[in-house]
Image (cartoon, rainbow, N blue to C red):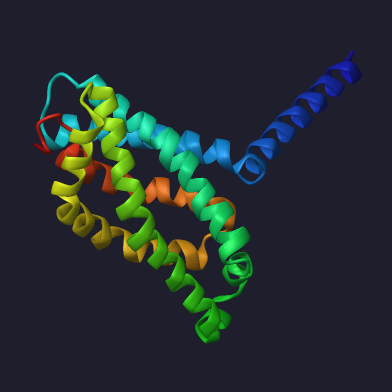
Amino acid sequence: MIALHLRRVLLFRAGVAELLNSARRFPVTRPLVFGATVASVKTAGSDYAAQRYVEGRVEIDMKRNSVFFLWGLLYLGGIQYFIQVRLFTQYLFPRAAAFVAQPLQRKLTDRAGQLMVAKQVGLDMFVVHPFMFFPLFYQLKAFVEGTCAKEALQRCRRNWGGDLRALWLLWIPAQTLNFAFCPVWARIPFVAVVSTVYTVILSTMRGSPDSNK
């Protein structure tokens, strides 16, 4: 009887240990699913915080919140994964993972690697975000709100300067750290964590239907 009980305890402990090991491996083995989950939950949560604690709303605008949930799921977790992980590290900058794996002392003397980080930041901040991130954000927002695509593009152009200034202030230093130090699988989770602050800013600036007219 004691032996049977001991065997059950050992099997339970082994099962728990395997479950924990699977959980630890999940971000590495399923980076797209992990990143999209973190990004969608975080982005919706940041909008909720902006509405409740920054704007002081008693009733949460769920349509607005759904914009940010879908944005986190589809763009931050999906499209951004393919840009920053697949396109950048597998095609445009195949040495990216090797540079990240180097100790800090080696990074400080690796001029080619530093230039590679700068190019990734430049592409992300001055090409992807101005010409993809914001146009798609305003289109998704218009779709959820029931307004037309033409109006969404007009809003995007009208707010472009202010949106980019707010973006660059936070994201140029953040993406420099990301591309220089984060393992490839951790790029999107890092972005999701840092963008908690940026999403509150974006939600406050552009979340409401009348905030960008």
Identify which residue is drawn at 33% across, 52% down. 131
Above/below status of 121 relative to 163 = below
Please tell me which residue lies in front, 145 or 63. Answer: 145
Identify which residue is drawn at 36% across, 48% down. 132
Identify which residue is drawn at 38% across, 67% down. 122
Check the picture and name the quadrant holding the N terminus. top right
Left/right of residue 28 with respect to residue 127 in the rendered view? right
- Could you tell me residue 145's position as x and y percent? 22, 23
- Could you tell me residue 156's position as x and y percent? 21, 44
Extreme residue toward the front, this view: 150
Extreme residue toward the top, this view: 1
Please tell me which residue lies in front, 25 or 62. Answer: 62
In terms of image quadrants, where is residue 60?
Answer: top left
Above/below status of 138 relative to 60 = below
Check the picture and name the quadrant holding the C terminus. top left
In terms of image quadrants, where is residue 75?
Answer: top left
In terms of image quadrants, where is residue 31?
Answer: top right
Left/right of residue 111 with respect to residue 141 in the rendered view? right
- Could you tell me residue 197's position as x and y percent? 27, 47
The number of numbered discs placed on residues in the rendered structure image is 0
Left/right of residue 27 with respect to residue 111 in the rendered view? right
- Could you tell me residue 104's position as x and y percent? 53, 77
Identify which residue is drawn at 28% across, 23% down. 144
Left/right of residue 169 with respect to residue 94 in the rendered view? left
